[in-house]
Structures are given as C-alpha cells and as structure tokens.
Amino acid sequence: MNATTPAFDITSLHAFYGDGGSVADVVEAVFARIIEVSDPGILIHLVERDTVWPRRRNSERSIRKNRFSAFLSP
C-alpha cells in the first residue's frame, strides 16, 4: 500500500499512524477496497460514511494518545 492507503494488518497500521497517517485515510481505504473487491461472498455490513465520521474523530484522538482503537483493527 502507499502513504495514504495502508495495509490493514496491525503492525502496518501502527507504523502508518506513527508516521502521521490519519484515520480518515484508513476509513476511505476500507470503503474503497470493499467497493473494489465487490465480492458477494464477503459478508461485511458497510454503514453509510456519515455514520462513520463521529467514530473516526474519537478514534483519531485515541490513536494520538497511543491508545490504538479496535475500531480500526482488521
């Protein structure tokens, strides 16, 4: 992945956030990957982006305080 679309394993996510990556980048990458794969066999409930953003802001604060959020874990 690149600077704005991290790999989703826990080690890569820690490195991504440590390098200043944002929760918004991860959330957008998740949405994009689900849409790109478009596999009906993958049972993931995709919520509307508008409902994700309040949680993203809380997760961003947690990450900046070194409390990695399970919300962003695979």
Image (spheres, rainbow, N blue to C red):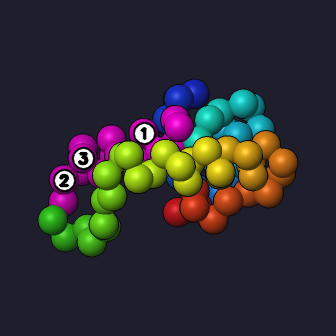
The answer to whether residue 50 is magenta is no
Q: Which residue is mark 2?
A: 38
SS type, badge 2 = loop
Farthest-out residue, top: 3
What is the crowding at mark 1: few (fewer than 14 residues within 10 Å), some, or many (at least 20)?
few
What is the x, y in percent for residue 62? 75, 52
Segment tinted magenta in the rendering = 24-39
Q: Which residue is mark 1?
A: 28
Three-letter code for the amino acid on which mark 1 is drawn: Glu
Three-letter code for the amino acid on which mark 3 is drawn: Ile
Query: Looking at the image, do the residues carrying marks 3 and 2 touch, with CB atoms under 8 Å apart?
Result: yes
What is the crowding at mark 2: few (fewer than 14 residues within 10 Å), some, or many (at least 20)?
few
- The answer to whether residue 15 is visible is no
Front disc: 1 or 2: 1
Query: Looking at the image, do the residues carrying marks 1 and 3 touch, with CB atoms under 8 Å apart?
Result: no
Query: Left or right: where does residue 5 sit relative to residue 43?
Result: right
Three-letter code for the amino acid on which mark 2 is drawn: Ser
Label the magenta part by its dominant secondary structure: helix
What is the x, y in percent for residue 74? 52, 63
CA gap, disc 3 and disc 2: 5 Å
Answer with mark 1 or mark 2, whichever residue precedes in sequence: 1
Q: Which residue is mark 3?
A: 35
CA gap, disc 1 and disc 2: 15 Å
